[in-house]
Amino acid sequence: MLLFIPHAHSAPPRCDPARKIVHIAQPAYPPVEYRVGFDASVTLEFTILKDGEVTDAVVLARDPPDVHDFDVPSIQAVHGSRLASSARECRQQMKIKFVIKQ
């Protein structure tokens, strides 16, 4: 499940929450964590370019905080996502939740 969370401050400016999502790439669940039923979340910040391309993703937080196995799949997912074109680039945060539904 992917969830956009507005960012309080940044440069470039914060994204318009009304900016349409064209495509959200689904992250790959790390295989070992999937087999053992391990859930986690990763909060990222990234730049959305004028053409809607996502770039410069960085991990801001993770839950649990000491598990890094979900970082790379999260970054790959946001870099594979696309938003509608806009007159300016902006920064945005996204929280990605990895949850195995029973």
Image (spheres, rainbow, N blue to C red):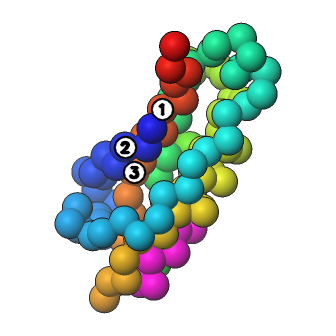
Q: Are marks 3 and 2 in contact (CB under 8 Å)?
A: no
Vertically, is 3 above or below 47?
above
Would you say residue 91 is visible in this rendering?
A: yes
Name the image quarter holding residue 50: bottom left
Q: Is residue 54 magenta?
A: yes
Residue 3, disc: 2
Percent of width and height locating residue 47: 47, 67
Q: Which quadrant is home to the N terminus? A: top left
Using residue 25 as the reference point, say whether residue 68 is left or right of it: right
- Which amino acid lies under the numbered mark 3 shown in the image of this protein? Gln
Give the main secondary structure, helix, strand or loop, of the magenta stretch.
Answer: loop
**Mark closer to the chain start, 2 or 1:** 2
The residue drawn where x is 69% and y is 22% is 34
Using residue 23 as the reference point, say whether residue 14 is left or right of it: left
- Which amino acid lies under the numbered mark 1 shown in the image of this protein? Lys
Segment colored magenta: 50-55
> Nearest the camera: 57 or 20?
20
Vertically, is 75 above or below 67?
below
Percent of width and height locating residue 42: 52, 35
Name the image quarter holding residue 2: top left
Q: Is residue 3 magenta?
A: no
**Disc 3: which residue:** 93
- Which amino acid lies under the numbered mark 2 shown in the image of this protein? Leu
